[in-house]
Amino acid sequence: MVVTSQGKLGAGNIAPITKVDLRNASNENIIGIGVTNQSASSAGAGAVQYHESGSNWGLSYSNGSSWVFLPVVPDKALVYATKNTAQSINSGGTTGTTIINWVENTDQTDSFDPTTGVFTAPRDGVYIVSVNLATQSGSIPNNSYTETIVQSNTTTGVPQFRCVNSYPGYTTGSATNTSGNNCTAIFYLQTGNTISTGFRHNFGSARNLAADSSLNTLTITQL
């Protein structure tokens, strides 16, 4: 430890260039900051402490009259999931079949349950959802449709988005092809609100979703 003639203190550094300089090659250049019983006014503006605020620990500084807790920016939710297994979707109905058994590729806040297909908001905020779903190839009758549903239990704003793809007027009466659609939704969620996705069609008999992770994808992003 050295104190230069200019009043600069070096700890593990014999050539300090700031008032207090801990920088050296040992990678142990950290400062331990603890709790103080001093008031913000007695500590003076610019003082820093590490203490508890509510149930959280963090840094606060004195502005000369009070301790100000430094805000911490939490990780925002980001989910990317794919589905590579078939799932049977019955024909008809109004509510749709909940899409389950996703493969979770990214989940920054551990907020998505790939088995149930349910996302739980980790905090209040705006969330954008984009889902692509496609069926296995099969007969598509005249005047039929597929519908992808993105829904939430939020009580603020729009709780459900429904996106329809229709297949009318084949001259042969029916056609054989894959089917499906994309749906994008935006929700304002409070902590604990959930999002799930569903799918429905009216092909006249059950149809499986394609077992193809490139066709069945889900992205949830917190703004």
Image: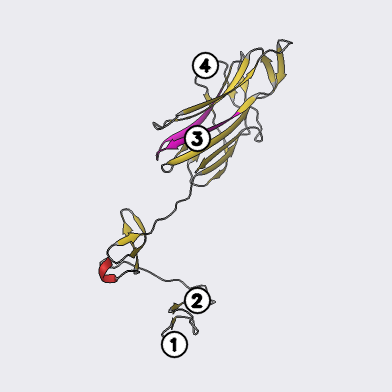
| In the rendered image, the vertical position of residue 102 relative to residue 41, given as above or below | above
Query: Label 3: which residue?
Result: 186
Q: Which residues are magenta?
A: 182-199
Query: Label 2: which residue?
Result: 23
Q: Secondary structure at mark 4?
A: loop
100 or 200, which is in the foreground?
200
Q: Secondary structure at mark 3?
A: strand
Find the distance from the CA under tag 1 to the CA under tag 3: 60 Å
Query: Label 4: which residue?
Result: 93
The amino acid type found where label 1 is placed reads Thr
| In the rendered image, the vertical position of residue 7 relative to residue 177, given as above or below | below
The amino acid type found where label 2 is placed reads Arg
The amino acid type found where label 3 is placed reads Ile
The amino acid type found where label 4 is placed reads Gly
Q: Secondary structure at mark 1?
A: loop
- Residue 173 placement (x, y as % from top left): 71, 10
Visible residue check, residue 38:
no
Residue 195 vs residue 54: left or right?
right
- Residue 116 placement (x, y as % from top left): 50, 33
Find the distance from the CA under tag 2 to the CA under tag 1: 15 Å
Labelled disc at residue 4? 1
Mark 1 or 4: in front is: 1
Mark 2 or 1: in front is: 1
